[in-house]
Image (cartoon, grey):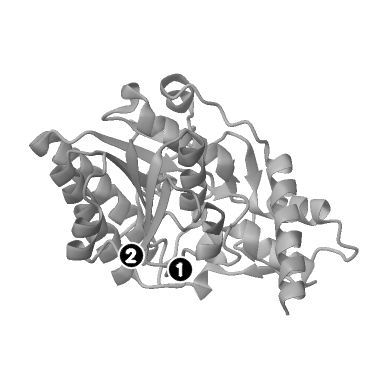
Amino acid sequence: MKVLVAGGAGFIGSHVCDALLSRGYEVLCIDNLSKGSIDNIKHNLRNDKFEFRKIDILDRETLFSATKGIEAIIHLVAFKIPRYSSAIHTLLLNSQGTINILDLGRINCAKVLISSTSDVYGKSLNFPFKENGDLVLGPSTSRRWAYAVSKLFDEHLTYAYEDEYGLKVIIIRFFGTYGERQYLNWWGGPQGVFLKAIFNNEPVEIHGNGKQTRCFIYVKDAAEATVRALEKGEALGKIINIGIQEEISILGLARLIHQLSGVPHKLKVKHIPYSSFSKNYEDVMRRIPSIEKMENLLGYKPKVKLTEGLTRLIEWYKGEKRKKLHED
């Protein structure tokens, strides 16, 4: 099977490409490199079954002409929560980009896997979050919810294409993902930001009081589950959480990364009030997934616990620092 990975040079996307290639698939990786990097995929560039093309999924003409003959699509392109960015970009890229991907799937009669987000659960208090549970979003006056709304629209659009055109679709909802090749700013979540601050002996920025909890899945586990979702016939037409149930507070995460890093200095913490973000910013105080579908439909349970995954991330980070020093 020839699989198109949209956003394949990104953090999660590059690991998904690795997982596909390890199974013998042909992989066409496309990315506009606005967030992704050639460094993430350079180890695959000489693989005969791997091809990279710099393509923006909003460029319909180029997208459609360059991807003929694909049999499956994994769509990982998205603009995230507009905490430090643009709600316009989040809403328009995520909606129009998904329309283009779904049209591409329809034209090629390809199976389409759409990535969504745990953010669509919003402020629900029905723990753990089940895929058929109610979604509780905040007010439209808080642009923080633009990401969740855009991905929820993507989900409904995906099912509309299934209904209207008989398109074979799967939707996965990623919970917090971390690991090697992670972005080292807030685009990639707290782990990279905390690592940089800790190794530079700078204060770790904690949003709010740090008591909000999350469940973080190691990226190789997330990539494996993603490929299984594409492969398993039982996953067709389903929404599946991709996550782990190991819960930790954000402040606890900072303390654990500091402990594992082995640095000699004490942890410094700087609390950032939500009022410093965009208008009416709201946070989610707890987020934990139900993973029954992932285990039962995909036959997969995450293998890497948080401490082990963070240890691997730290070793990768140290290696990147050594590499940069050598290059300089």
Taking depth in this image into account, of 169 and 50 the one nearest to the observer is 50
Residue at 19%, 46% (x, y): give it: 157
Image location of residue 203, percent across then percent down: 74, 71
> Picture quarter containing residue 81?
bottom left
Taking depth in this image into account, of 189 and 76 the one nearest to the observer is 76
Regarding mark 2 in the picture, which secondary structure is present there?
helix
Note whether residue 218 is visible.
Answer: no
Q: Residue furthest left?
A: 164
**164 relative to 317 in the view: left or right:** left
Residue at 49%, 52% (x, y): give it: 14
Image location of residue 119, percent across then percent down: 42, 49
Image location of residue 99, percent across then percent down: 19, 54
Amino acid at circle 2 = Thr
Note whether residue 36 is visible.
Answer: yes
Taking depth in this image into account, of 318 and 133 the one nearest to the observer is 318
Instruction: Tell me the distance, in whole angstroms, between the alpha carbons under discs 2 and 1.
Output: 11 Å
Tag of residue 83: 1
Amino acid at circle 1 = Arg
Quadrant of the image for the C terminus?
bottom right
